[in-house]
Image (tube, helix red, strand yellow):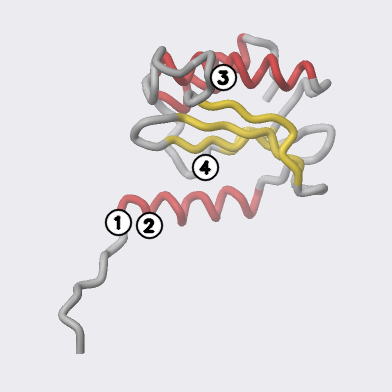
Amino acid sequence: MSTQRRKKTNPKVIVRIKHKSKIRSRLSGTTERPRLAVFRSNAHIYVQLIDDVKSTTIAAASTQEKELRGKAGASIEGAKLVGSLIAKRAQSKGVKSIVFDRGGYVYHGKVKALADSAREAGLQF
């Protein structure tokens, strides 16, 4: 028998995943109203516009892109930049209204800043 210990998943991550699955059971993106999915790590923020009917990603943005790299990272300022960038990309694809999927995160701080900047840039939730 090996003496290696198993890694335990952080309880906060388990709670977030439970919240995420509950949210996803109620939300679905269509071609007319795609789902804006948010993921935030310790270092970066990522968003995608997803059409769940076709199972395709329409547009994506993150703080790791060339024009945003080194500016803000996973801060509120970075979230604002990513929110306005995804709104511009969505409008260039002809998307005006979306369904917001906060990904199990509390609608506060970075997630709220991202949503507010996307609204200011022209997306309707």
In primary-sequence order, the first of circles 2 and 4 is 2
Quarter location, residue 87: top right
Q: Residues within 10 Å of mark 2 (few under 14, many from 20)?
A: few
Amino acid bearing label 1: Pro
Q: Residues within 10 Å of mark 3 (few under 14, many from 20)?
A: many
Pointer 2 and pointer 1: residues touching (CB < 8 Å)?
yes
Secondary structure state at the residue bearing disc 1: helix
Pointer 4 and pointer 1: residues touching (CB < 8 Å)?
no
Which numbered circle lies on residue 11? 1
Amino acid bearing label 3: Gly
What's the CA distance linking mark 4 and mark 1?
A: 16 Å
Quarter location, residue 8: bottom left
Amino acid bearing label 4: Gly
Q: Nearer the viewer, residue 97 or 38?
A: 38
What's the CA distance linking mark 3 and mark 1?
A: 29 Å
In this view, the residue farthest toward the bottom is 1
Residue ID at (45%, 54%)? 17
Pointer 2 and pointer 4: residues touching (CB < 8 Å)?
no
Q: Which residue is mark 4?
A: 103
Amino acid bearing label 2: Ile
